[in-house]
Amino acid sequence: MDATYIKKKIEQFKTTINNQLHHSTLLKYIDDPILNDEQLFYLLLPLFNGEQWDEDLNISAVTVAMVHASLNEHEKIDEYHATSKEQQLTVLSGDYYSGRYYQALANTGNVLLIREMSKGIATRCEQQIKVYEKNKLTIQDWFDYIVSIETELINKFYSIYEFDKYYTIMTNGLVLQRLQRELLNYQNGQTSTFIKMIQSCLDSSDSFDKVIGQKVNKLKDQTNEFLQTSTLNDELKLYIKNQLALVQK
Amino acid sequence: MEKMKLKMLYTDLKQDIDIIEKELEEALNSSSHLIYEASLHLLQAGGKRIRPVFVLISAKFGNYDIDRVKNIAVPLELIHSASLVHDDVIDNSDMRRGQHTVKAQWNNRVAMHTGDYIFARALEYVTKIENKKVHQILAHTMVEIVNGEVIQIEDKFRLHQNLKDYFRRIKRKTALLIESSCELGAIVADCDPKVVKNLKRYGYYVGMSYQIIDDILDFTSTDKELGKPAGSDLLQGNITLPILLLKDHQEIQQFIERASNGTVTEQERLEMLQIVRNSDAIKKSMQISNQYLVKALKEVEALPNNPMKKKLRDVALFIGKRKF
């Protein structure tokens, strides 16, 4: 199993999700669902590592991605100006994807996953709304926020199917990639909610790239250490190292 | 006053409605002060709780146990509330039930997270029920409600639509959730399948009538009674039954044209309200609503003898005469 196989499998998985979420009217006005390749990779990591993977498990993994797609749509809503037809339908597309995920799990009778996904969504919403709370938060609080946004739902999925051994690499991998993206955006003069929130916590002696750079390096070290002792197959280890740019060149 | 009258219709259910009310608040309990405040904001604005009431009444036709019945009554009300929070973003509404909406009090993103949070809590709550059929019905209802809203946006300011389009839209917008309230209340109480069908159809007919009356009240009520400006539906481009019945009226056509450009003045809004109120469209709409109520009452007749039959009739008749 090489990188080409993994990427092909992720693309096939995306097609399945898009088919499940297809809505001809919505697609006339808004783009395809937003699916994050990195999250899809970690969602499928147990499969790539040879874990038993039946149709029920596949449907469950698809629904986790559908929930991500739903929440991603709602992330696109403007704080103050959502009156355009496109924005109105974006609200509804998120709701539609949410209904479709519930429908898929209802049809398989997977009440446990419905419950755990619901808890995960609630936790994510609680984290996301922190941006608008008046409480003064610390840099660590904002790291916890990123962990929750990136990993909460996959973590619930792992937990139900006893894939907990993948939790550390999934969390490190997704958080690391998110922080690297934020760092790159910052260096390119762009901004984001996360950048603004971290900046609001900084002492005068600190800077965003210094604080995030340190965190990135720490996570890289931890990930390298983890991969050295991990039972993941070697091709997967190499794939993850490449994705996280951990390969020594 | 009207709400008092409705509450008097089900005074004997008050104890159980109070349990539902308490559970609704508890279900929204959150470690985030803001999300809790925003979630309760709408809930405490005082909805009529008609969906839980339909669940309770329907369940009385079977093995009634409030500890089981609340597992469907609470999520149905939460789903309704969550959809209102998102609807206010879509409609850019600042007021609902005389209070600022979540999006007006905070912003659209807070409203999105709050709506998603309430939806999630609703689904978490309903997982206390293991019955697969219950989840399939509820999921289907949720998807169809969204489909109805998508169609509503597609149909905005489009005067060239027919009554069938309107009925299809209000079925999804309102009737389905009331239909599901009756059906699911009966299912969780293990009612006979025929009783489930009768109650389901009753809910559908009552739901259709309820929305038609809602659409009439948008023109006939005062701003104060509505808690928002009368005629708001049309200003937002929603072509409802009274307007469809007046679609050949030249001044109404011109008003819709101006509304679609966002150039309606306050004076023009008041004039439009006068035209609708003075026309026979309100009377005709009432007649159509009544036709649905007659069908609802027929379903009640087909139900086995039970003291709740009178209540179903009373609620249906109340809906036909309601003024809020």
Image: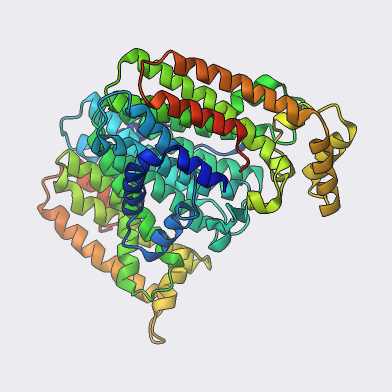
Q: Is residue B155 left or right of residue A50?
A: right
Residue at 18 percent of width and 40 percent of height: A160
Residue B115 against residue A48 in the figure, above or below:
below
Residue pushed farthest bottom? A205
Q: Nearer the viewer, residue B296 or A12?
A: B296
Q: Is residue A50 left or right of residue B288?
A: left
Q: Toward which corner of the image does residue B56 lie, by quadrant?
A: top left
Count how many numbered circles sit on residues in the image.
Answer: 0
Residue at 57 percent of width and 52 percent of height: B97
Q: Nearer the viewer, residue B139 or A5?
A: B139
Residue A187: image x %, image y %?
47, 68
Residue B27 against residue B215 in the figure, above or below:
below
Residue A111: image x %, image y %?
25, 33
Residue pushed farthest right? B250
State the scheme by which the image is colored: rainbow
Q: Is residue B77 left or right of residue A174?
A: right
Q: Nearer the viewer, residue A116 or B170?
A: B170
Q: Toward which corner of the image does residue B199 lie, by quadrant?
A: top left
Q: Nearer the viewer, residue B256 or A186?
A: B256
Q: Is residue A53 visible?
A: yes
Residue B220: image x %, image y %?
72, 41
Which quarter shows the C terminus of chain B?
A: top right
Q: Toward which corner of the image does residue B55 lie, by quadrant?
A: top left
Residue A95: image x %, image y %?
47, 40
Q: Is residue A11 visible?
A: no
Residue B25 against residue A111 in the figure, above or below:
below
